[in-house]
Image: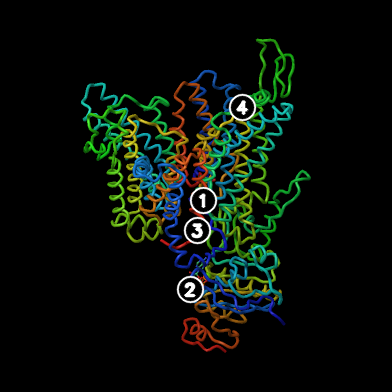
Amino acid sequence: MGYIIETRGITKRFGGLTAVDNVSMGVNAGEVVAILGDNGAGKSTLIKMISGVHKPDEGAILLDGKPMKLESPMDALANGIETIYQDLALAENLNVSSNIFLGREKTKRSLGMFNVLDHEYMQQESRSVLDRLEIEIPSLKNTIRTLSGGQRQAVAISRSIYWQAKVLIMDEPTAALGIAEQKKVLDLVKSLKTQGIGIIIISHQMYDVFEVADRIIVMRRGQNVATRLVSETTPDEIVGLIVGSETVKR
Amino acid sequence: MPRPQMPHDTPTPFVQTRTGKLLGRHWALFFLLGMMAIFAFTGPGFFEVVNFQNIIHLATISILLAVAETFVIITGGIDLSVGFVMGLSSTLAARIMVTLGSTGMGEPMLIVLGTLAGLLVAFIPGFISGTLVARFKVPPFIATLGMWGICNGITLHLCDGFLPIAGLPSVLPRLGNGYLFYIHKGQSFTLFKKPDYIPDERVRELIRLVPFSFILIAAVVLVFWYILHKSKFGQHTYAIGGNIDAAIRAGIDVDRHLVKIYMLSAFLAGLAGVFNVFQTGIGNYTTFSSMYELFAVAAVVIGGASLLGGKGRIVGSMVGVLVLAVLKNGLAISGVQPFVRYIAVGVLLTLAVIIDQLFPDLF
Amino acid sequence: MNTLVAQRKRNTLGTIGRNWVLVFLVLEFGYFAILTRGFASLNIVQMILFYGTEAFLLATAELFVIITGGIDLSVGYVLGFATVISSKLMVVFASRGLSPLGAIVTSILITLCVGLIPGFVNGVLVAKLRVPPFIATFSMLGVCQGVSELLMQGIPAKNLPPLAGTIGNGHFLYIVPGSGISFMQRPDVARGVRVIEIIPNAVVFALVFIAIFAFILTKTRFGQHIYAIGGNIDAASRAGIDVKKHIIGVYMISSFFASLAGIIYVMKYITGKADAGAASLLDAIAAVVIGGASMFGGSGTVWRTILGCLVIATLETGLRMRGTPTFDKYILVGVILIFTVVIERFFPDFKR
Ligand SMILES: Nc1ncnc2c1ncn2[C@@H]1O[C@H](COP(=O)(O)OP(=O)(O)OP(=O)(O)O)[C@@H](O)[C@H]1O
Ligand SMILES: [Mg+2]
């Protein structure tokens, strides 16, 4: 089975700094791939290229084996690639349902000629997707500004699972969450996986990774230094690879 | 003013080259020189000492305001009130001289008191803007726009509506427009004053060198260059503009520093206002269409500062002022309609920033 | 029990707080009504609206830009540019034998199209070339000023079709008590017969456009996206919103409204000049900020912006009626402007 999403030798430079250096990787449908690496290793930059935020300087991104032109985040979204960003990327001045539907607002005809926002529909749908996550948010009319870190994260996650994604990218999805919420997110990842979605997850929590991932990719200074099946490795080995004491590439 | 950051921030590689960097860093200077070269051909009398002297003398106010704006902009702020603080100082100084003059006070005393009042009053709007920005977290744009309105209103009170204040000691314009050296070719040479045998109408026959305004400009630029680039105060100014949180954590009293910055800015505006009285011999309110503050900001930005803060230099700002002043003078001498200058300034300013964008981390 | 009372009290306070501009406006109007005879009358209210029309439009222009976190310094001179273009065109078309109405309508349509250009250029500079809005729009200010002055050559346009003034200073509805009403057309009545004039045409014209764009801002995706861009531009772009297109659109809306204001100016004062809007920048920005928008973007509504305009317009008319120097207005607007922001600092609940 071919990768559902794949990068081939992609590179990204910021001025003199090579943030991502010739990285090839791929994810199968129904597989969870974890990307690990120290701060600044280039994890976020790698996934931002897959989600169309940054344009790679070199290399190609393939969707279902076909090279894909990613000019903007719009193209990624249109191709079923959903992303939860590390900084969440929510508009703090807008309310919960507006954020869940941001960029893909549901409209309805008004007076037979204008397309106006269908807030009612969006609120209902938001409520049901949030319920799936079982995360308590008092009112969907509250702006993001008034929410806690965990609630914000829930909104960001709901935002991306609402749209039937083929590929889901999560950049440190559990970072701001309490223990119970972390567990919910991990359960969610497992259930999404059974639906055949390809998932890329970035996390510094070794426990999370070993709990949900099938495969681990270790990045160091922008490079993909190792790929391991979870069933064939140990947290110790991974830590070694991250800090650079083990450099064997299998 | 927060600026939307556009996605895909990839710098163009060509600017990484040595020549590219040199050009990019000093483009305003090169532009100034290039412009002067062109005007040397198109404008009769452009390339003469007397004309250059004139350009700088007439740019005194812009220079003072640009120095003021440089400090504020480096902290990431903006001072929209400078033009109207200047008007306030100008009219107050003039009003005091007129009022005290009617009591029969001697001229030297009048001038000293008027000047002092004009300079001191400027600290008030500066203190208020600074306090609003620093302690009440009012965005600088709003705080100084508010002071803009307030100073303008008070100024218009001082000059009874829209009437410049006249009837000041006649020695003022002679001081403000005086020169250090007067040379009557082959006949005489005097310091500070034209030779007495030449009547006012024939003053153009003299070669006059080094206007008094140069002394003021030199002093201000030197002092503030020193403060910005050589003192702790200057260092902290950059630190605040670069990253205000880091500056706070580094133990800088950011609030106090900001208040000082806005007071400094207003003081320079006041100095410009008082100088304006000396230069014109009357107290002038600031008209809406003069837009001193916007031109000062423009000069500072052309000089390489960023409105996001943390970046800017006194010398750069001076080059910025000169670019605008030479442009104005050169176009006028070349017989171009004055209105074209507005367009030219606009186009130039935008170009400045676009060029600056191509060279992201030069300073 | 006590907490309930306290809570209710807080709610009332909160409501007043959130609507303090409205409360302030009412108090302000009351103040002038008590001090000035004849202030609380239909005529004065209409006068406030009539003289405030350009300000409403400019403030709406500024609001759209400010919501995205930008600023448009050029609105005043785009207004001037529009007055010059439209007045020149009216004169030209009228002299070429077009009917007065034809000349006026054609000129307006052309001006509205031409008036989009400054906004388009601003938008492209800001969105595509990443020029800070302050610089881009200040440059545009200079260009508009220069071009208008060049077109005008120092002489404000004269000999406009008189119909322009009739429409611009006319009213939407005329009531002759006891004998009838008439739309748009001043009834022919003998001198001395009282005609009640209702709603100046200029105000109707302006409000129609303002209402349409208020609708766009609150009800459509475009409006929603503008708020999102102002709130978090990265989030907006990662959500697939074409940020650049929206920013260009917003600056075009801004210069469209500034041009509308210019047209109204011409129709009201039957002349056009480059600096017609030179003094209105402060008022426009102040109205938006008094109306509760943040200069950092992401907030602000048309309705509250109009309230902000009314605060200023009432002040101006009130001072004029009282014979106080009108430049006191600048002081008071400055004070109110600062006051607004300080209030919202101290009472964050007041923030809408
Ligand atoms: N927009 C940008 N402009 C310039 N440099 C950037 C940009 N984004 C990231 N970088 C740099 O690229 C490198 C990789 O950053 P990245 O965010 O991908 O790291 P990361 O692996 O996600 O780290 P963390 O675990 O801290 O999130 C860093 O050195 C960072 O400073
Ligand atoms: Mg990261």
Q: Nearer the viewer, mark 3 or mark 4?
A: 3
Q: Nearer the viewer, mark 2 or mark 4?
A: 4
Specify whether tag 4 is near ligand 1 (CB below 8 Å): no
Q: Which residue is mark 1?
A: B350
Q: Nearer the viewer, mark 1 or mark 4?
A: 1
Q: CA distance from mark 3 to mark 1?
A: 11 Å
Q: Which residue is mark 4?
A: C268
Instruction: Please report the residue visible at 53 percent of the width from the left and 58 percent of the height from the top.
Output: B5
Q: Is B188 situated left or right of C177 in this image?
A: left
Q: Which label belongs to residue B357?
A: 3
Q: Secondary structure at mark 3?
A: helix
Q: Which label belongs to residue A39?
A: 2
User: Residue C310's image quarter?
Assistant: top right
- In the rendered image, residues at marks 3 and 4 fall on the same chain: no
Chain of the residue that carries numbered disc 1 in the rendered image: B
Instruction: Please report the residue visible at 39 percent of the width from the left and 44 percent of the height from the top.
Output: B132
Q: Residue furthest right?
A: A112
Q: Amino acid at mark 1?
A: Thr
Q: Amino acid at mark 3?
A: Gln
In the picture, which quadrant includes the C terminus of chain B? Answer: bottom left
Specify whether tag 2 is near ligand 1 (CB below 8 Å): yes
Q: Secondary structure at mark 1?
A: helix
Residue placed most toward the observer, B32 or A238: B32
